[in-house]
Image (spheres, grey):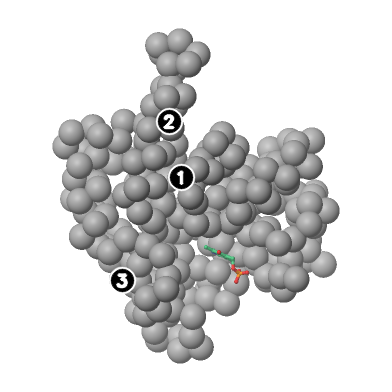
Amino acid sequence: MIAENLQKIQSQLPPQVTLVAVSKFHPSDAIREAWAAGQRIFAESRPQELSAKVEALSDCPGLEWQFIGHLQTNKLKMVLPYVSLVQSVDSRHLLDAIEKWAASESGAAGPASVRKVSVLLEMHVALEESKQGFYEEEILDILMQAVADGSYKHIRFCGLMGMATNTDDAEQVRADFTRVRSYMDYLQDLFPELTDFKTLSIGMSADFPIAIECGSTMVRIGSAIFGERG
Ligand SMILES: *Cc1c(COP(=O)(O)O)cnc(C)c1O
């Protein structure tokens, strides 16, 4: 079932779009099944759960973890050493803490070792106030600071993540995604020196076809692969 779901989704993705399998709340066996079917990138949203699964699946070569949940600064040590990308950086406080952590890790293995953490900045576009994320001006401020004074030497800014309004109204979803896409284009024009700033992570199980039409380069899909979360 999982293998079929993966195949069906992959067949709808253009080659430039990366599929991230969101495995939160699903058991390690389900992840192993997806891995056996060829899926390599998985994302979790809770530090404790990530730790347990990293351990349980350490025998799966090539398996790569990302983090997509709200990350508290006292949990960085549980997450950052194990993930290739933090998609959900949603506050200055968190960004500064990640910088500090990576700076302290750097040099531990000699002066030449610089540890960089790859992140996406989560942009707030949905109508719900409850959703996390930065507003446009905050993202602009962060990137201006990053290129101007090197305050984020240990952070690799890889792009934006966005979640659309939770609604059946396809036009609202399209408007939300278009807003992130447009802002991404604007930032890429403004900061050509940020050569890693390429990933636009938009699209989940219910709305990824629209996200792709809006220029997504990364989709985060859970229930359409693993079924409903228990
Ligand atoms: C849970 C989650 C997803 C996946 O949602 P599905 O509807 O199951 O595809 C994607 N992105 C984030 C940030 C999530 O928390």
Q: Secondary structure at mark 1?
A: helix
Provide the residue designation for mark 1.
73
Q: CA distance from mark 3 to mark 1?
A: 29 Å
What residue type is disc 2 on? Ala
**From this viewpoint, which residue is outermost toward the top?**
110
Q: Residues within 10 Å of mark 1 (few under 14, many from 20)?
A: some
Which of pointers 2 and 1 lies earlier in the amino acid sequence? 1
Q: Residues within 10 Å of mark 3 (few under 14, many from 20)?
A: some
Which of pointers 3 and 1 lies earlier in the amino acid sequence? 1
Residue 30 placement, left or right of 174: right
What residue type is disc 3 on? Arg
Q: Secondary structure at mark 2?
A: helix
x, y percent for residue 37:
78, 53
x, y percent for residue 85:
50, 44
Which of pointers 2 and 3 lies earlier in the amino acid sequence? 2
Image quarter where the N terminus lies is bottom right
Which one is in front in this view, the residue at disc 3 or the one at disc 1? 1
